[in-house]
């Protein structure tokens, strides 16, 4: 088995592109086959940078591909001429202005536009004369006028299209370069691709592929189409990586966008996906990209990281937002590990740790009023403040002793002791263990914040 994925050098790779590449990769590797990456470079303004970016993304996610095919225009032109000689294609001299006029007329009549085959029976001698005097032309495929074309897709089953609905598609453009559909057939044949994989929105183009294979005398491969991904996000892939979504979580999640495993298992490594992926379980219905679900997956993967790997992963995101040069390694590690089981992605560490880096917190006037309106709470806060001032060694044990002393002295409960302290020093009613927060905040910040209330 051999599959291929095509890179479009003037298009950034996004979630659906990555999912399509993954499916093509898994289909091949599941049967111990080969996965090929090709580059569509027929555009005149090819971005080498985008090609490198796409390749680097495939490398980053762990795809192993065997070859990248450089396209050669003269090969395609020769095959197109062969089709012209056999009567399966023809030269078309219709100008862009003429075609645009016909499109406008079709639009006014509220009918879909399809090329009317004006040049299909153009005399060959006259066509050669026009070519010799360098008139612009394209080469079009001559579709059958009658009958129907049927092909079998391994996901969507038998698909039948009336030949009268097939437009005489362009094979060679006026600049001599091949079109996407035509080049794919030639490339896939030369690469011995056994299974052509692509998005389901290209199902309607497959009869044209099939006729090209047959007219050129090529072996017809098997076809596998994937369901579309419905998403409101555009170009989100790089943003996900920049925000600190793990590649393992992304791959795991997108593998389930259009594919259902045989079991209820949800978590798969790339190696496990290769073992379990069966194209017979690819769905026909569109898949919905759910960012909340992806965050959940990423959260699970973050929690599974060893502490060492987690620190290496999340620290750059902390340092992207905050200066930690005056912090000890012990303090930084303590802070990051405190939130290991709470963050969903890398940059979220900046949101959850903000209270440890800002000089002051914004307490709502209502919260301050509520605290000051309760004499028992104010008594506990005052004693807590004085005990913090007296504490010379600031560590977890000394903080525990301070809290125990305040509790014993005031007979305050959690509601009248721990909650008021948390609100006063963090500005939040909920969060990590209070003692851990107090230790990380340090005496100076705690006293500064208590001064707002007490």
Image (cartoon, rainbow, N blue to C red):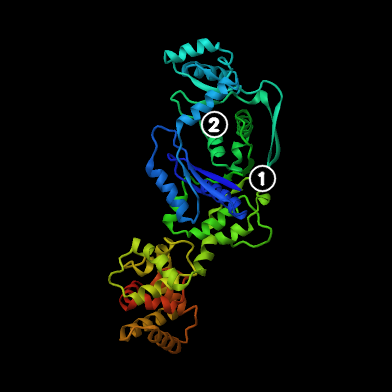
Say which quarter of the image contains residue 373. Answer: bottom left
Residue 390 appears left or right of 128: left
Front-lying residue, 161 or 112: 161
Question: Who's the residue at 52% across and 46% down the image?
Answer: 36
Which of pointers 2 and 1 indicates the residue nearer the eye?
Answer: 2
Front-lying residue, 345 or 55: 55
Q: Between disc 2 and disc 1, whose residue precedes?
A: 2
Question: Percent x, y for residue 423?
Answer: 43, 72
Q: Is any atom of residue 266 visible in this view? A: yes
Question: Percent x, y for residue 381?
Answer: 39, 79
Front-lying residue, 97 or 375: 97
- Above or below, 452 against 151 in this view is below
Q: Name the residue under label 2.
A: 182
Residue 7 appears left or right of 449: right
Question: Percent x, y for residue 329?
Answer: 34, 75
Q: Of the numbered discs in the image, which one, if any, rests on residue 324?
A: none
Q: How crowded is mark 2: few (under 14 residues within 10 Å), some or many (20 or more)?
A: many
Q: Quadrant of the C terminus?
A: bottom left
Q: Mark 1 points at which residue?
A: 284
What is the CA distance from the residue labelled 2 to the residue labelled 1? Answer: 26 Å
- Above or below, 69 against 58 in this view is above
Q: How many labels does the image show?
A: 2
Question: Who's the residue at 63% across and 40% down the image?
Answer: 221
């Amino acid at each position: 088995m051999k599959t291929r994925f095509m890179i479009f050098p003037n298009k950034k790779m996004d979630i659906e592109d990555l999912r399509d590449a993954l499916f093509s990769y898994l289909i091949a590797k599941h049967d111990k086959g080969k996965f090929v990456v090709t580059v569509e470079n027929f555009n005149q303004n090819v971005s080498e940078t985008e090609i490198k970016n796409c390749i680097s993304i495939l490398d980053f996610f762990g795809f192993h591909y065997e070859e990248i095919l450089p396209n050669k225009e003269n090969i395609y032109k020769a095959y197109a001429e062969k089709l012209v000689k056999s009567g399966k294609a023809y030269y078309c001299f219709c100008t862009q202005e003429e075609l645009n006029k016909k499109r406008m007329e079709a639009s006014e009549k509220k009918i879909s536009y399809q090329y009317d085959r004006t040049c299909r029976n153009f005399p060959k001698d006259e066509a050669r004369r026009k070519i010799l005097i360098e008139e612009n032309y394209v080469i079009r495929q001559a579709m059958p006028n009658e009958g129907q074309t049927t092909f079998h897709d391994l996901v969507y089953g038998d698909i039948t299209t009336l030949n009268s609905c097939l437009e005489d598609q362009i094979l060679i453009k006026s600049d001599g370069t091949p079109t996407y559909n035509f080049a794919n057939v030639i490339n896939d044949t030369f690469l011995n691709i056994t299974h052509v994989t692509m998005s389901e929105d290209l199902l309607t183009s497959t009869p044209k592929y099939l006729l090209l294979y047959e007219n050129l005398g090529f072996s017809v491969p098997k076809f596998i189409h994937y369901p579309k991904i419905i998403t409101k996000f555009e170009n989100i892939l790089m943003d996900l990586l920049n925000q600190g979504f793990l590649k393992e979580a992304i791959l795991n999640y997108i593998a389930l966008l259009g594919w259902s495993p045989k079991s209820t298992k949800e978590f798969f490594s790339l190696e496990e996906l290769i073992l379990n992926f069966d194209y017979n379980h690819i769905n026909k219905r569109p898949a919905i990209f759910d960012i909340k679900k992806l965050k959940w997956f990423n959260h699970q993967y973050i929690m599974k990281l060893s502490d060492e790997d987690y620190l290496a992963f999340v620290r750059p995101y902390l340092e992207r937002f905050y200066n930690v040069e005056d912090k000890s390694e012990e303090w930084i590690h303590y802070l990051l590990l405190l939130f290991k089981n709470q963050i969903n992605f890398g940059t979220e560490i900046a949101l959850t740790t903000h209270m440890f880096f800002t000089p002051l917190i914004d307490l709502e006037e209502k919260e301050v009023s509520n605290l000051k309106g309760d004499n028992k709470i104010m008594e506990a806060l005052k004693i807590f403040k004085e005990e913090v001032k007296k504490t010379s060694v600031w560590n977890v044990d000394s903080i525990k002793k301070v809290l125990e002393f305040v509790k014993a002295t005031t007979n305050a409960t959690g509601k009248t002791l721990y909650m008021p302290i948390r609100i006063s020093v963090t500005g939040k009613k909920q969060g990590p263990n209070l003692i851990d927060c107090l230790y990380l905040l340090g005496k100076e910040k705690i006293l500064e914040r208590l001064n707002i209330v007490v």
